Image: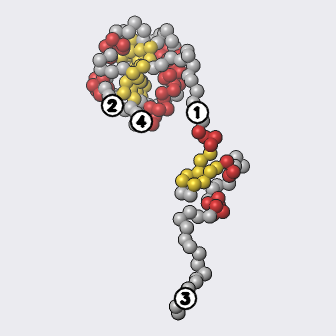
Amino acid sequence: MAGTTLTTGFTTASLTPPVSIRRSFIPTSSKLNIRSFRSYGSVSLRSRRFNRIVCEAQEATSVQVLPVTDETWQSLVLDSALPVLVEFWAPWCGPCRVIHPVVDDLAKEYTGKLTCYKVNTDESPSIATKYGIRSIPTIIIFKGGEKKDAVIGAVPRSTLCTCIEKFL
């Protein structure tokens, strides 16, 4: 047996599957071009086209809804000459994310007639407690430093417009 080698019909194992097997796991789509992908073994496939910047600058005329804290509550909300819309929200709240763009649009639409602010209830719980906020999002309209109306939940834009119009 000296000098003989044992051969088997098995090939050596590879940690990286052949390209033909890797390509079979990529979903087929009319918009997917397999040649645009690079493959590096177990590294995820990624297109070079996705490495560009996709965000754009906001309009220069956009009105930003500013946050209110315990320290700024009195001066910004209660002492305001204009009616004030205050959105009570929290970062973990899904419906709050739905109503954010609506409040932003209302701030733009009612510029000069109404001031809009946001209160993060996690960062300013004393304000939320003072006004009995038990559910978010809650929108409260203040006029002359007094609470005039409240809307609870992610409501349609038209509902908020109706509430605002009563106090302008």
Q: Does residue 141 appear anywhere in the picture?
A: yes
| Spatial CA span between label 1 and label 2 | 33 Å
| Spatial CA span between label 2 and label 4 | 11 Å
Amino acid type assigned to the residue bearing label 1 in the image: Ile
Q: Which residue is mark 3?
A: 3
Helix, strand, or loop for circle 1? loop
Q: Are marks 1 and 2 in contact (CB under 8 Å)?
A: no
| The disc label shown at residue 72, or none | none
Q: Are marks 2 and 4 in contact (CB under 8 Å)?
A: no
Tell me where residue 70 sits by quadrant.
Answer: top left
Residue at 66% over, 63% down: 20
Q: Nearer the viewer, mark 2 or mark 3?
A: 3
Q: Which residue is mark 4?
A: 93
Residue at 64% over, 40% down: 49
Q: How many marks?
A: 4
Q: Does residue 166 appear anywhere in the picture?
A: no
Tell me where residue 126 sits by quadrant.
Answer: top left
| Spatial CA span between label 2 and label 3 | 78 Å
Nearer-the-camera pick, 7 or 161: 7
Helix, strand, or loop for circle 2? loop
Q: Residues within 10 Å of mark 1 (few under 14, many from 20)?
A: few
Nearer-the-camera pick, 154 or 36: 36
Residue at 33% over, 11% down: 75
Q: Nearer the viewer, mark 1 or mark 3?
A: 3
> In the displayed structure, would residue 35 be above or below residue 147?
below
> In the displayed structure, would residue 37 be above or below residue 92?
below
Where does residue 142 sit, x and y in percent of width and height? 38, 15
Q: Are marks 4 and 3 in contact (CB under 8 Å)?
A: no
Q: Which residue is mark 2?
A: 122
Helix, strand, or loop for circle 4? loop
